[in-house]
Image (cartoon, grey):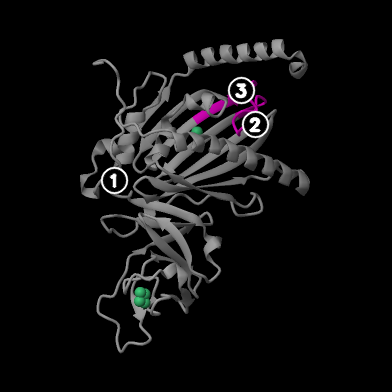
Amino acid sequence: MADTRTLDHGTTPLRYARGWHCLGLASTFSDGKPHAINGFGTKLVVWQDSKGELNVLDGYCRHMGGDLTQGEVKGDNIACPFHDWRWGGDGKCKEIPYARRVPLRARTQRYETAVVNGQLLIWNDPEGSAADRDILPPELPDVLTDKYTPWSWHTKEINGSHCRELIDNVADMAHFYYVHFAFPTSFRNIFEGHTATQFMESTGRPDKTTGGYSDANSTLKSVATYYGPSYMINWLTVDYKGFVTEVILINCHIPTGPDSFTLQYGISVQKPEGLDDKTVDYIAERYTESFGEGFLQDVHIWENKVAVQNPLLCEEDGPVYQLRRWYEQFYTDVADIKPEMTDRFEFEVDTTKANEYWHAEVAENLAKRAADDPETVSH
Ligand code: FES
Ligand SMILES: [Fe+2]
């Protein structure tokens, strides 16, 4: 039928995004052994040298393709298991023990590194530019001190979808009710330069009890910012009956192929003051668990949805198309970035109508439940 809307799945980009990508907690790479990380359509090798620096190279040796992640760290270099060629963190071949000299220009793909908030980040740019350290994600004060719990860090492989699927979430007001079981009372976006931010306030749905957003006794203030294409910091302030807790959620990913990526998320909770250690740990663990669950609610949707180039939107949806324009800058040569990709853009969604409907629906759910089983809803 001519008036039936069709889904345009689009085509996945041919390149990987320019920007900083997180490979995980820096401490996981500091044991003096080579580590394998899938990324950018290849395998990367990560190791710590004798100066304590973390190095990242393409994992396949430029001699005859040996797998460097199965090699050995010798001195500061990674030695290939095939013929023992030694590669330095700067990407140069430093030594071939059995040869009279190293061939000229024996150089492999290296990735510049940075450690931020205890996490290892690498710079990717298909154009080969030097790393832009001015756009690293900010250091989080007090995280990694005893004021916060250590990162609870998780990794999940996602196959069958492109990582751009994650990004739409930044502009998605309504999914907080349906996926996270919360009433989003206030919802605003700002996109500017290399950052995209979502400001959201919510209270939990009393008819649901799972996930970090769903507690009816809690109100939540959330600020979530993408710093570049793949690294988001989400500051969460939870007010539970006047008891306020700060939670930090990191959501980051690295593309592994044209339609696959590795998702990582980490949670650190500010330890409440004036409580004994056991209670502090207990509270922190509960928040870690519930925000982990909340995040997996998103993951479940991402894993099962299809890509849509032409989403059909209503007024209550946030600025999805503007957000995608912002995201486009990371797949564009620097010389071709257009002002509309980076200019400041601000938008607030009017949540009035949505919340009227949702509150009525929840009241109905509770009434139904009370009628079905009077015992369980007596308090
Ligand atoms: S393939 Fe790596 S040394 Fe030969
Ligand atoms: Fe979400």
Tag 3, which secondary structure? Answer: loop
- The reply to whether the magenta stretch includes residue 239 is no
Rendering quadrant holding ligand 1: bottom left
Vertical comparison of 70 with 206: above or below: below
The mark nearer the N terminus, 3 or 2, is: 3
- Is residue 344 visible from the viewing direction of this image? no
| Label number found at residue 178 | none
In the image, taking residue 115 as reference, residue 196 lies left or right, namely left
Residue at 42% across / 38% down in the picture?
Answer: 166
- The reply to whether the magenta stretch includes residue 218 is yes
- Which residue position holds label 2? 239
Vertical comparison of 180 with 148: above or below: above
Three-letter residue code for mark 1 = Tyr
* Coordinates of residue 1 in the picture (x, y in percent): 26, 15
Residue at 53% across / 71% down in the picture?
Answer: 32
Instruction: Give the mark toward the camera: 3 or 2.
Output: 3
Tell me the magenta residue range.
200-219
The mark nearer the N terminus, 2 or 1, is: 2
Q: Compute the Cα span from label 2 to label 1.
A: 39 Å
Residue at 57% across / 11% down in the picture?
Answer: 360
Three-letter residue code for mark 2 = Asp
Q: Which of 195 and 108 is in front in this view?
A: 108
- Which residue position holds label 3? 205
